[in-house]
Amino acid sequence: MNKIGIQSGILYDDTSFEQGMEIVKAAGFDCIDFNIDTKVNIREISKGAKDEFFTKSDDELKEYYRPQKELFDKLGLEMSQMHGPFPVYDAENQAATDVIYNATVKCLMLCEYFGCPYLVVHPAVGKDAQNEKEINMYIYKRLVPAAKKYGVGICLENMFTGKDGHIIEAVCSDITQTCEFIDELNEFAGEKIFSFCYDLGHATLLGKNIKRSIVQLGDRLTVLHIHDNNGLNDIHMQPFSQTRSHGWVTDWEGFIDGLKAIDYKGVLSFETFNSLVSLPKELHPAMVNYIGAVGKFFADRLAR
């Protein structure tokens, strides 16, 4: 049976993590997707701000997160994936790019500390396809030594962008090219370090054939970002919340069929923070319970 997970963002922060994790555990979740990306504002770094968090030493960062790690162990929760800082590249500011590279290396170190197998490092969206590939090859190859040192996998993700009011494809949205990209990176690394985080919401925005994409990814698919949207905006809502006259906006059946076709054994992880933003805090446990029920429903479908 697949384990189910949910992101930490909105659910809890460093001052409220005990209550937040208990809500997660009570809803039947096994895992957390840790939003460590909130610890650094890349756009402010690009404007000259200092990184006050990831400049701490490894020991200082481990001590900072020790209470959370102890609570994870106590509650029997796993950190199945970590959401890395984003964006990871500033074309006009190499110093800012270096700051975020160092922060990402610290995230890999903390993944090892938490026993987290995957760090999602969003690819950088360039001005054209060739520009995107060159930039991202530089970003990911630079992370190989640290990934090997800490024994943590790095996940790419399917991206979108906008132009003249339209949502258009960006890096890793073409699955054929993405498979080639991942294979090329792993060949460079000399081992399987790189894999894929399939963002279901991004695929829905771009009108992708979800089942076909998942089948094509095959065992390259190791991590999921499950959420719903209206096909127009990346709103990160709970599954089955967005409908049109003909039914659901997201192809949930294609999603399940695709995962079954590749015998996906990974965590069913939900990236549904806006479903909580839109509610009073008192209703957060009820929404988390609902998302947990959806996770169990998906896991049961995959187990048949």
Image (cartoon, helix red, strand yellow):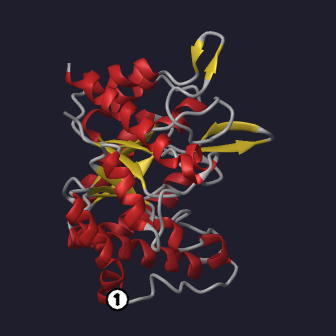
> Which residue is rendered at x = 49% and y = 21% of the image?
251
The quadrant the C terminus occupies is top left
The quadrant the N terminus occupies is top left
Residue linked to disc 1: 60
Judged from the image, the secondary structure of the residue bearing numbered disc 1 is helix
Closer to the camera, 48 or 30?
30
Examine the rendering and report whether any part of residue 125 can be seen: yes
Residue 101: percent from left, percent from top: 45, 74
Residue 255: percent from left, percent from top: 40, 25
Examine the rendering and report whether any part of residue 177 can be seen: no
Tell me how many marks there are: 1
Residue 111 lies left or right of residue 247; in this view the side is left
Vertically, is 45 above or below 138? below
Residue 264 lies left or right of residue 209; in this view the side is left
Q: Please tell me how crowded label 1 is: few (under 14), some (14-19), or many (20+) other residues with Cα within 10 Å.
A: few
Vertically, is 167 above or below 208? below
> Which residue is rendered at x = 60% and y = 72% of the image?
41
Residue 9: percent from left, percent from top: 49, 58
> Which residue is rendered at x = 36% and y = 45% of the image?
196
